[in-house]
C-alpha cells in the first residue's frame, strides 16, 4: 500500500468502553501503526439523549489506560453539525436526497399494509421525486425529514477485509432518513461525512455494523467520495457461548483495571480474540504492530476465556520489574490498612510473592501481611500451634542474635531446632508464620522472616509467647 493509511475508532459515548469496542480500537490502531499510518479517535455523540460527558471521559481514560494512542482527535460529531447540514443542503439541491412529509402514523399504515400483502415493511418512496411523477401536496405545518435517494437498481458489493466478498441488493435498502424533522442528522449519514472528511482509508469495526455498510457505501458514492475499505470483526462470545454481555462476563475495560489486570495483558489477550500470528500467544505491542495483518482475522466468532486472560496477566506480572510493580501496587495497598513505611522494601516483597499472583489484587493481598501490625490471635494460635513448639520458639528468639539475618542462616537455625526439639518442619514453620506475620500460609518461611526483619520477628514471637505462656 502506497498512500497514507488512515483508520479510526468511533465510539458512541453512551456508556463505558466495553471489550468489543476496545478490540475494534486495537485492531484499527494496530492496522494504522503497521503501515505507519494515522489513527483517529472520533466521538460519535449525536445521540444527545444517550451521550454523556461521563461516558466520553470513561472512553478517553480507557484508551489511555490501554495505551491506544491516537494521532488525531478526539473529534466530536456534535461540533460538525454545520458541515453535515451543508452536505445535506448540497444533496437536496443535487437530488440525491429529498424531503419526505410522511407522518409516523402514515408510515405505520404503510407498513401494516405491506405486512398484510406479505411484503417486507419499508418506506415506499412516495415523496421521492421522479421525472414525471406528481408528488402529494405538501401538508401544512409538517416539518419534513430528509431521506437519501438510495439507488433503485443494482447491488452494493465490497470485498470485506475479514469476511470476503459481500453483495447486498439495493432492493433490500430503503431510502434512509439522513436528517430528522428537527433538522438533526442521523448516525449513518454523519459517519459517511466524517469518514470522507477525515480521509479514512480503512474502516475496521464490529460486525454488528455490517448492515450499515451498504447504506454508507451508497451515501459515500452519492457524495463522490473515495470509498474506504471495510473490515468487520467477528463477534465476541462469552465463556457460555452466548454474545458477550454484562450477564456472562465483565465487559467494561476499566473493570479489568479495578480487578488488577495489566493493560499489556489485556491488549495481548484482545489481540488474540479473532487474530493470530502462527502459534504466538504472548507478544509485545511492537510485535503485534509488526505482525498485524487483517487478512489473518478469523471470520468466525471469538470466545472470551477468563482463564487464558488470567494466565497472560500472571505472565505479565512476573515479567514486570519489581520497582514498576511497586508503583502500581502501592495505591492498592492503602485500603488494606497497611503502612508501607513500617515494613520491608516493597520491591523485595514483590519479588518474593509475585510468581503466584494472577492479578494485582491477589498480589496486594499477598503483600499485606508484611506491612500490617501483627497481634497474637488466640484462635489462630489454638488452631495452628501446638504447645510442643513453644520451647523451640523461645530457642529461636534466643539464637536469632547469633546469626546473620538472611535466608540461608535462618533456614539452618530452623533445621537445627527441628532436630533439637524433635519437631516436623510444618509444626515450627506454621508457628513462626502465625506469630511473625499473623497467618498460617506464606511463601518460604526463611525468605518471609528475612524480609520481616529480625527485630520485628523477635518482638512478635516474644509478645506471643508472653501472652500464651502457661495457657492450657
Ligand atoms: N459509533 C458506532 C458505535 O459505537 C461505531 C461506528 C463505526 O465504527 O462506524 O458502535
Image (spheres, rainbow, N blue to C red):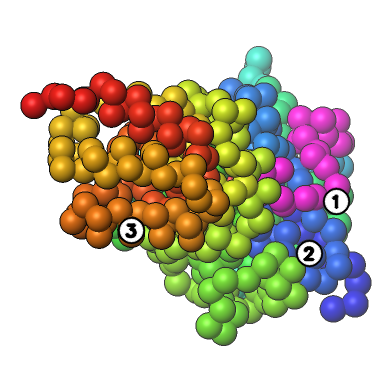
Give the image location of residue 110, x and y in percent: 44, 39
**Looking at the image, which is closer to me, 312 or 188?**
312
Magenta residues?
64-86
Disc 3 target residue: 416
Choose top left, top right, bottom left or bottom right for residue 411. bottom left
Q: Residues within 10 Å of mark 2 (few under 14, many from 20)?
A: many
What is the secondary structure assignment of the residue under circle 1?
Answer: loop
Disc 3 to disc 2, C-alpha distance:
64 Å
Give the image location of residue 369, x and y in percent: 43, 36
Disc 3 to disc 1, C-alpha distance:
65 Å
Q: Residue at x 41, y 45 (%)?
A: 399
Disc 2 target residue: 32
Residue 220 in view: no
Choose top left, top right, bottom left or bottom right for residue 377. top left
Name of the residue lying farthest toward the bottom: 278
What is the secondary structure assignment of the residue under circle 2?
Answer: helix
Q: Are marks 3 and 2 in contact (CB under 8 Å)?
A: no
Image quadrant holding the C terminus, namely top left
98 lies left or right of 165: right
Q: Is residue 177 magenta?
A: no
Disc 1 target residue: 71
Amino acid at each position: 500500500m502506497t498512500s497514507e493509511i488512515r483508520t479510526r475508532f468511533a465510539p458512541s459515548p453512551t456508556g463505558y468502553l466495553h471489550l468489543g469496542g476496545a478490540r475494534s480500537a486495537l485492531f484499527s490502531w494496530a492496522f494504522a501503526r503497521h503501515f505507519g499510518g494515522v489513527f483517529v479517535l472520533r466521538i460519535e455523540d449525536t445521540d444527545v439523549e444517550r451521550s454523556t460527558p461521563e461516558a466520553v471521559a470513561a472512553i478517553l481514560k480507557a484508551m489511555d489506560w490501554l495505551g491506544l494512542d491516537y494521532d488525531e482527535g478526539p473529534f466530536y460529531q456534535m461540533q460538525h453539525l454545520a458541515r453535515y447540514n451543508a452536505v445535506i443542503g448540497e444533496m437536496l439541491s443535487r437530488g440525491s436526497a429529498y424531503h419526505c412529509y410522511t407522518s409516523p402514523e402514515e408510515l405505520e399504515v404503510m407498513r401494516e399494509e405491506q405486512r398484510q400483502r406479505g411484503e417486507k415493511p419499508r418506506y415506499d418512496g412516495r415523496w421521492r421525486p421522479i421525472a414525471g411523477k406528481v408528488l402529494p401536496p405538501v401538508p401544512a405545518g409538517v416539518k419534513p425529514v430528509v431521506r437519501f435517494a438510495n439507488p433503485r437498481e443494482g447491488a452494493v458489493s465490497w470485498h470485506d477485509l475479514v469476511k470476503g466478498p459481500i453483495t447486498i441488493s439495493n432492493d433490500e435498502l430503503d431510502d434512509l432518513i439522513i436528517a430528522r424533522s428537527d433538522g438533526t442528522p442521523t448516525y449513518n449519514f454523519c459517519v459517511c461525512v466524517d469518514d470522507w472528511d477525515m480521509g479514512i482509508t480503512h474502516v475496521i469495526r464490529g460486525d454488528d455494523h455490517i448492515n450499515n455498510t451498504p447504506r454508507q457505501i451508497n451515501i459515500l458514492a452519492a457524495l463522490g467520495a473515495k470509498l474506504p475499505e471495510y473490515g468487520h470483526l467477528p463477534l465476541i462470545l462469552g465463556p457460555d457461548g452466548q454474545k458477550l454481555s454484562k450477564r456472562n462476563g465483565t465487559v467494561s475495560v476499566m473493570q479489568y483495571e479495578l480487578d488488577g489486570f495489566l493493560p499489556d495483558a489485556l491488549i495481548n489477550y484482545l489481540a488474540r480474540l479473532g487474530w493470530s500470528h502462527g502459534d504466538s500467544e504472548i507478544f509485545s505491542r511492537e510485535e503485534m504492530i509488526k505482525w498485524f495483518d487483517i487478512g489473518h482475522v478469523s471470520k468466525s466468532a471469538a470466545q472470551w476465556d477468563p482463564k487464558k486472560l488470567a494466565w497472560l496477566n500472571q505472565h505479565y506480572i512476573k515479567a514486570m520489574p519489581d520497582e514498576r510493580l511497586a508503583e502500581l501496587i502501592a495505591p492498592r495497598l492503602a485500603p488494606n490498612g497497611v503502612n508501607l513505611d513500617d515494613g520491608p522494601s516493597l520491591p523485595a516483597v514483590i519479588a518474593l510473592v509475585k510468581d503466584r499472583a494472577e492479578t494485582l489484587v491477589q498480589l496486594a493481598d499477598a503483600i499485606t501481611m508484611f506491612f500490617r501490625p501483627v497481634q497474637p490471635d488466640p484462635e489462630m494460635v489454638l488452631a495452628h500451634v501446638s504447645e510442643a513448639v513453644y520451647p523451640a520458639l523461645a530457642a529461636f528468639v534466643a539464637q536469632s542474635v547469633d546469626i546473620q539475618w538472611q535466608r540461608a542462616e535462618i533456614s539452618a537455625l530452623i533445621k537445627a531446632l527441628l532436630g533439637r526439639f524433635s519437631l516436623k518442619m510444618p509444626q515450627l514453620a506454621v508457628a513462626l508464620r502465625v506469630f511473625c506475620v499473623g497467618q498460617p500460609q506464606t511463601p518460604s518461611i526463611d525468605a518471609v522472616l528475612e524480609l520481616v526483619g529480625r527485630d520485628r520477628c523477635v518482638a512478635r514471637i516474644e509478645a506471643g509467647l508472653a501472652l500464651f505462656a502457661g495457657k492450657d
